[in-house]
Amino acid sequence: MIKLAIFGLGEAGSLIAQDLVAAGVAATGYDPKPLATPPGVVRVDSPQSAVANADIVIAVTPGGDAFRALEQAFDETPPTALYADFSTNSASAKKQLAERAAARHIAFADVALMAVVPGKGLRTPVMVSGTGAERFAALFAELGMPVEVVRGEAGEAATRKLLRSVMMKGLAAVIIESLRAGEAAGCAEWLWENLSGELARADEKLIARLVSGTAPHAQRRLHEMECTEALLRELGVDPLMTHSTVESLRRVPELGIPNIP
């Protein structure tokens, strides 16, 4: 039976740990916060106790806690263990974590969660890179996790996640700004139905058309977004995202548009 230590029993960590136990993994968990213990996880009072005799240590913590998580039982972590960091972090931070792990010859996996964990748990798709990537993939794919290995050092998986976040998190911010304006204009319900309908019908052709159509129609789109920015200001809504779109369109003649792969 695989012996696993998990640092971080928040929402994501608890859901993943619970599924690991159901898959037959012996999981020991540690979290300094007074959080509920997932069913089947053996809760311990110290990180040192968690990593004792562990085959794999996974840290499902906020990015700001990643270094603390690695260091808290560093000397007690078996050098034969695989350390897998699930935090969302910069590529440089992942490289530093990997270098620290390498000081004790511990294999390190930079794990990037590529979807929200609630509703998926252990079946949340991930990308992984680093010296422990292949080992992580072999273990977790067998347990039911969709794993894509990215060749290269720690940070490569993190880079791909953050590049995707430019669009995913940016899209959320644009929708929020649009809905604020819709509320101010008294048509929030119509706007929500319109926006959600457009996204539900979206496909690769639409995305390609949005990109490829920007260069030939840059001036028209710029004028439209300048009008949109003015409208939001009239409605009392700070056009933070809309202003960025205006500035982006102003730079199209100089910077051009990236090629669509």
Image (cartoon, rainbow, N blue to C red):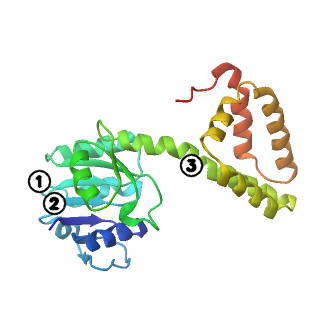
Secondary structure of residue under mark 2: loop
Labels 1 & 2 near each other (Cβ < 8 A) = yes
Query: Where's residue 243, x and y in %?
Result: 74, 40
Of the image marks 1 and 2, the number of the one nearer the N terminus: 2
What residue appears at the point 21 percent right and 65 percent down from the top-left corner?
A: 4
Query: Where's residue 22, x and y in %?
Result: 28, 74
Alpha carbon separation for disc pair 1 and 2: 7 Å
* Front-most of residues 217 and 57: 217
* Front-most of residues 5 and 199: 199
- In which image quadrant can residue 257 be found? top right
Residue bearing the label numbered 3: 168
Figure check: 170 above or below 75:
above
What residue appears at the point 27 percent right and 79 percent down from the top-left corner?
A: 40
Mark 1 or 3, closer to the camera: 3
Labels 1 & 3 near each other (Cβ < 8 A) = no
Name the residue type under label 2: Asp
Alpha carbon separation for disc pair 3 and 2: 34 Å
Figure check: 254 above or below 113:
above
Residue bearing the label numbered 2: 55
- In which image quadrant can residue 250 be found? top right
Residue bearing the label numbered 1: 80
Of the image marks 1 and 3, the number of the one nearer the N terminus: 1
Labels 3 & 2 near each other (Cβ < 8 A) = no
Q: Quadrant of the N terminus?
A: bottom left
Secondary structure of residue under mark 1: loop
